[in-house]
């Protein structure tokens, strides 16, 4: 998953990832794409606030389209997503670019794309398993935990050098620092 970085966002926003196609510049006024591209745009927000305020939560707006840098984005409603630790779905704000038709979903930067548990939760579970040889007591299913560990091992093999000797927890941190979801599936 490529990361979008640039000086054109306010400091509140962080890198986001496009999950349909590789981003490419689109000139304002050029022919729009036939199909909408979807992007996740990570922002610094607290799930607790979103849970408490629902659709009234004051989401910010990216200053430009993260795909084509068009200067204006339109509101595009909300999308419901589930997160571990919350009894109901939370509403994440969406925007749409009128130039390239990209639909941008804002998502808390405490979480990876498509994973309901937080990065911190995932790391702490893996840490105990890797250091103590057993999983912590948790409401998360064992199959989910094993899935993360398997994916981490695969990501480490695929993305880090063959001579990686620092262990899987260090690999988790290294992959995270490079913008990779350490427990994500190899695509
Ligand atoms: Zn755009």
Image: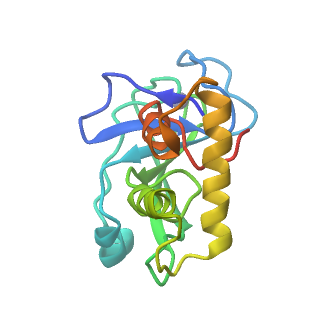
Locate residue 153, reporting x and y percent: 64, 44
Q: State whether residue 39 appears in this view.
A: yes
Q: Quadrant of the N terminus?
A: top right
Which residue is pictured at 49% across the width and 58% down the height? 126
For residue 58, above or below residue 95 = below
Relative to residue 78, is residue 54 depicted above or below? below
> Is residue 184 something that shows in the picture?
no
Using the image, determine if residue 57 lies above or below residue 182.
below
- Residue at the location (37% across, 74% down)? 54
The coloring applied to the image is: rainbow
Drawn side of residue 173 relative to residue 10, left or right:
right
Q: Is residue 100 left or right of residue 11?
A: right
| Percent position of residue 35, x then y | 74, 38
- In terms of depth relative to the viewer, which is nearer, 168 or 41? 168
Where residue 27 appears, as percent x and y from the top left, is 55, 15
In the rendered view, tell whether residue 109 sits above or below residue 20: below
Quadrant, the C terminus: top right
Residue 124: % across, % down? 41, 61
Return the residue nearer the eye: 61 or 148. 148
Q: Nearer the viewer, residue 72 or 38?
A: 38
Give 97 or 183, whichever is nearer the viewer: 183
């Amino acid at each position: 998953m490529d990361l979008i970085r640039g000086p054109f966002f306010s400091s509140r926003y962080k890198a986001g990832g496009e999950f349909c196609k590789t981003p490419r510049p689109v000139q304002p006024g050029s022919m729009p794409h036939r199909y909408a591209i979807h992007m996740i745009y990570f922002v610094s927000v607290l799930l607790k606030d979103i849970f408490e305020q629902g659709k009234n939560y004051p989401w910010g707006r990216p200053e430009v389209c993260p795909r084509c840098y068009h200067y204006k984005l339109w509101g595009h409603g909300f999308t419901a997503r589930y997160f571990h630790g919350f009894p109901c779905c939370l509403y994440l704000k969406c925007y749409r670019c009128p130039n390239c038709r990209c639909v941008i979903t804002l998502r808390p930067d405490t979480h990876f794309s498509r994973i309901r548990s937080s990065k911190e939760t995932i790391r702490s579970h893996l840490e105990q398993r890797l250091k103590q040889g057993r999983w912590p007591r948790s409401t998360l299913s064992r199959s989910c935990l094993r899935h993360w560990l398997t994916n981490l091992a695969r990501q480490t093999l695929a993305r880090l050098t063959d001579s990686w000797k620092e262990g899987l927890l260090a690999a988790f941190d290294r992959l995270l620092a490079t913008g990779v979801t350490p427990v994500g599936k190899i695509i």
